[in-house]
Image: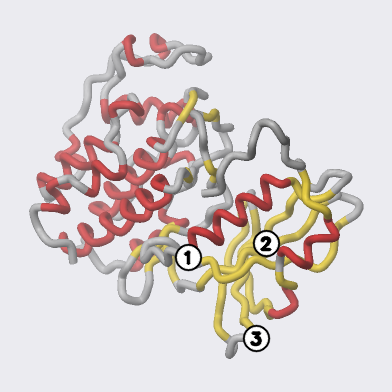
Amino acid sequence: MMSRASTSQSPPVVASINDVSALFQNAQKYEELSLIGTGAYGTVYKARDLHNGGQIVAMKKVKVALTEDGIPLSTVREIALLRQLEAYRHPNIVRLLDVCHGGQCLERDQQLVLFLVFEHVEQDLDSFLSRAPGPLPESRIRSMSHDIISGVDFLHSHRIVHRDLKPHNLLVTAAGRVKLADFGLAKTYDVEMKLTSVVVTLWYRPPEVLLGARYCSALDVWSAGCVLAQLHTRRPLLPGASDSDQLHRIFRLIGRPPRSEWPDNVSIELDSFPSYPPQDLARILPRIHPHALDLIKGMLVFDPSKRLTAMDCLEHPYFTEEPVA
């Protein structure tokens, strides 16, 4: 990671717009072929690399708000970090191949268009599960679970929280390996932060986010736990219709937490919820391997400080007592 700047000399908060060409390639080297998807944080296109034998890539278009002087330095730093991560070529992180600019600044909106160019993978986990002819074999579930948690652990080891783990943001290669993708919400972290309600798709949102409390990397572990449960049933574990409904579903599953664990400075009162007893997760996930059941239980813990870390998960007997395919 980039080191903190010396406090004796404050760094500039922006990079000059004139430096854009030196920082990023021009997007004209890519030919857009079709739209893959659109979200709140960017649009993704299938494209062809005209300078690399016609290689098919995925281009994420994002808009960066500019100041009067240029690009916020934080943007440059985060892109530099993404480039740094690419040097590791982690097998469970989608490859960032290039970062380029759209060639012009939109003066009216004071925005710069950037394109993050990633390797192209044909399907996401949501599509994979919907097309599966029946329950996934235990060996496949174990392998995919390990891939997901391995990718999360890699990000956390570099002080990055993904913040939007869900089947749509997990890509499945032709060989059946899973890669974490869509870092539109990913953010480097130094201290605990607060999330707005738009972060993390509702069904995979942990209770601390729904309550508006501070969060840390344990956020991703909760989301991953929801995904691991979905691998066993091919259905979302907690398909809430609203923030309130999501909290009720969570507490019906894991039980209403004790008052001692209720976070301070949140607007929702513990007494707003009935005293739900915890359910037997084994009844919801029939035929699940006992070690997988124990792992998911450890990931879906109300108190983030008591939740398993990604490293804890990788050292769980579910992965260590039998070889992972």
Q: Nearer the viewer, residue 235 or 85?
A: 85
Instruction: Tell me which colouring the rendered structure shows.
Output: secondary structure
**What residue is pinned by disc 1?**
87
Label 2 and label 1: CA atoms lie apart by: 22 Å
Q: Are marks 2 and 3 in contact (CB under 8 Å)?
A: no
Residue projecting furthest to the bottom: 53
Nearest to N terminus: mark 2 or mark 3: 3
Tell me: residue 296, above or below residue 135: above
Nearest to N terminus: mark 2 or mark 1: 2
Could you tell me residue 282's position as x and y percent? 15, 40
Q: Amino acid at mark 2?
A: Lys
Mark 2: which secondary structure? strand
As drawn, the label of residue 61 is: 2
Mark 1: which secondary structure? loop
Residue at 33% x, 10% y: name it: 259
Q: Amino acid at mark 1?
A: Ala
**Mark 2, mark 3: which one is toward the viewer?**
3
